[in-house]
Image (tube, coloured by chain):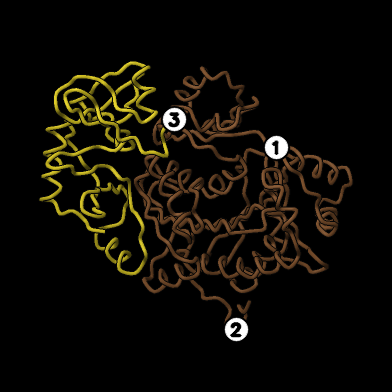
Chain colours: A yellow, B brown
Amino acid sequence: MKTLYSSDKKKILRQLEEQYGIKKLPYLLLQFGKEKIRLYSGNLSTDELFKLDKTLRIETAGLYTFKKQNEEIRLTIDALSPFKNQITQNILEINDKQALEWFKGNDLDIKSDRNFKVLKNQGDLIGCGKSTEERITNFMPKERRIKN
Amino acid sequence: MKTNYEPKEKFVERMNILLKDKEDVKKFFETAKTLPKKSIRINTLKITPKELIQRIKKYDWKITQIKDNPEIIRIESQLKPGEIGKTREHILGYYYVQEITSMMPILALQPKPNDIFLDLCASPGSKTTQAAALMENKGTIIANDLSIGRIAILSANLQRLSVTNTIVTRHPGTELFTKLIKLNFKFDKILVDAPCSGEGNCRISPRTFLEWSESLLKGLSRKQKKLIQAGFDLLNKDGEMIYSTCTHAPEENEEVVNHLLENNPNAEILPITNLPIKTREGITEWNNKPLNPSLKNAKRIYHHDNDMEGFFLCKIKKTSEETKKTGENSI
């Protein structure tokens, strides 16, 4: 477990603003592995977390929120809730049929600019996919998908 | 389709002693042969009860909201297998499928937004996620469990419900306590939802009757006494702990708490007054052995009283930082 320093956090926030319009990140960011960033909203200080990490077998902390993919950031489906009031860019409204395909884990044949897209249906933010211009790649976790 | 097993003679005898009334015992065993209704807890970290209820109208489920707890919903309709876990609202983490009696420990404990809270045997995460919602994702929860498989289930549920204030650890309970004591890391609230013989789960796990034995209870009781003491040692002064099980055996319930009271003059049982379902008092005598009279403030929940599952819980406060009586804590 590694705590991200404020310079790294600023860099991430700049990227989040550019991609999604997210301007505030009032949480501690923790890095597990090379790419996965987790958000911790609790009241322990960085020192207290380090102290615990040295003594305990910590498996995870906070919410897996985003993954760095090349120079871009992909939001996890569960990160959309804490940021729902801040996400203003790259939102793609989809219909019910497309949403069902998304929940099944299928890619969507939608032409769009080459960016990560936050998918919206019936007022819900239901996931974040990568547009390849021809289609939206699905990242819905396997265990959450609706089975056919 | 449910496979039923006949309860062992000794178990029937014990339930007769616990329930006293023959009609009551009859109802207990009749109910044991049936399946309980499903229930859900609305994840208030993501959606309000009003919004969720509006959304699930499309499923035509007949629902009942629990008085004073709008986030708790019982589904009265007969559901198809897996139906409740396949909805988009479930996928999006708007609700958690949880038996109502298993929501009682957190309702009794009432963790607050800035509390430091320990959930000792946390998987699959029902009570951890319930606590996180009450704490509004503030404060800190340490959620512990033993095996990597159980940790994976716990982590997946914390993720689905967007819990952000929790640290997940993997240790045997008593080992975790030793490490935390060394760090002098203490808690405002602790839940010791102890591994138990599961008599209260016999409606959904009929094998409980098959696997039940008095020696099983004795072995579990020894482990539970260690866990409750370790939990108590980690409480701050004025900190509160819930000890709970999903069983009725006094050896795993009142006797465990009694053991704690005998060894810790600074342990006090608090009354629990806010539960929205029918409960009965804890017992103060078992096997001709008198137990601490304050154990009547513990809560016994029998499945036929609420058409739910069975449970036991007791709320304990640490009144001072006095150490336990020396030489009297052997198990």
* Number of numbered markers: 3
Q: Nearer the viewer, mark 1 or mark 2?
A: 1
Identify whether A57 is placed above or below B103: below
Callout 2 secondary element: loop
Q: Is residue A138 left or right of residue B277?
A: left
Q: Are marks 2 and 3 on the same chain?
A: no
Classed neighbour count for the residue bearing mark 1: other residues with Cα under 10 Å, few (<14), some (14–19), many (≥20): some
Which residue is farthest right? B22
Q: Nearer the viewer, mark 1 or mark 3?
A: 3
Protein chain holding label 2: B
> How far from the left and from the top, in percent, is residue A73?
18, 39
Amino acid type at circle 1 is Leu
Protein chain holding label 1: B
Quote the CA–CA distance across marks 1 and 2: 47 Å
Protein chain holding label 3: A
Numbered tag placed on residue A146 in the rendering:
3
Choose between B29 and A117: the one closer to the eye. A117
The residue tagged 1 is: B35
Callout 1 secondary element: loop
Classed neighbour count for the residue bearing mark 3: other residues with Cα under 10 Å, few (<14), some (14–19), many (≥20): some
Amino acid type at circle 3 is Ile
Amino acid type at circle 2 is Gly
> How far from the left and from the top, in percent, is residue B253?
67, 60
Callout 3 secondary element: loop
Residue at 39% across, 74% down: B182
The residue tagged 2 is: B327
Identify whether B44 is placed above or below B151: above
